Amino acid sequence: MKERIAHICSFLCKARVFADVGCDHGYMTRYMLKNGLCERAYISDISEGSLQKAKTLLAAEIADGRCVPVVADGLDGIPEPCDFVLIAGLGGEEIVKILRRAYIPPRFLFQPMKNSEKLRRYLVEHGAKMERDYTFSEGKERRKYYDLIAGRAVGGDTYSEREFRFGRDNLNGCSPYPFLFQAREELEKTEERLRLALRKDSREALLGRKTELEEVIHEVTGNL
């Protein structure tokens, strides 16, 4: 099992009805069912071709009625409310569109590939409570970084502007190292782009980002 998938699986929790949106191969739904974490699971993907890999992996569970495949865009087409929803591997904006059309699940686990800030803002604006919000990594030679956001539909939350941009747990020291590696890599790229930038507005934007990254790295490092 890939590091990314194994990491996400470690945050899966018990539910009555579970949905894996954009389920890809279906590994995380298999983990839920194999470990008795849900009574029933829905796997959904945008097309029959996309869903076929998961249907093959979960053929036995589909045959006995514990897993229901749905060709759908997001939660569309899932015939009952789900008390735990996983959406991993989609962009933050796409996840927001799915939630707007449907609902924020009672419990959720999101792993956006980009635009995490927009997802955080949507969740906070609509009364959700974030229980974990941090960056994890996969690989050693060529490290890949992923954000993980887990929480509940109700409870409310308050985020600072910097927490929206970087993820709250990254800043409070709960999981600093992958985030620091990522921030330092971005700082190096920003400095390189700054050396090549000619336009005044581009330079100003890059200087602002460089300063912010330096401040965040200093702050998180100081808390270690």
Image (cartoon, rainbow, N blue to C red):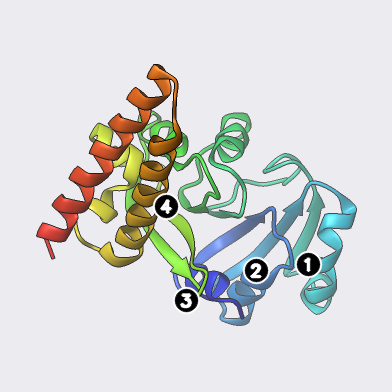
Q: Which of the image's four quarters has the C terminus?
A: bottom left
Observer-nearest residue: 200 or 36?
200
Identify the residue under disc 4. Answer: 149
At label 3, counting other C-alpha atoms closer than 10 Å, the crowd grade (few under 14, some 14-19, many 20 or more) is few
Q: How much space separates mark 4 and mark 2, taking CA atoms?
A: 18 Å
- Mark 3 belongs to which amino acid? Lys
Observer-nearest residue: 188 or 215?
188
**Mark 4 vs 1, N-terminal side:** 1
Name the element at disc 2: helix
Image point (40%, 18%), residue name: 201
Describe residue 142's horizontal placement relative to residue 68 as left or right.
left
Q: How much space separates mark 4 and mark 1, taking CA atoms?
A: 23 Å
Image location (x, y in percent) of residue 131: 32, 54
**Mark 3 vs 2, N-terminal side:** 2
Tag of residue 29: 2
Identify the residue under disc 3. Answer: 140
Identify the residue under disc 1. Answer: 54
**Mark 3 vs 4, N-terminal side:** 3
Name the element at disc 4: strand
Q: Residue furthest top?
A: 200
Name the element at disc 1: helix
- Mark 1 belongs to which amino acid? Ala
Image: 2 above or below 172: below
At label 4, counting other C-alpha atoms closer than 10 Å, the crowd grade (few under 14, some 14-19, many 20 or more) is many
At label 2, counting other C-alpha atoms closer than 10 Å, the crowd grade (few under 14, some 14-19, many 20 or more) is many
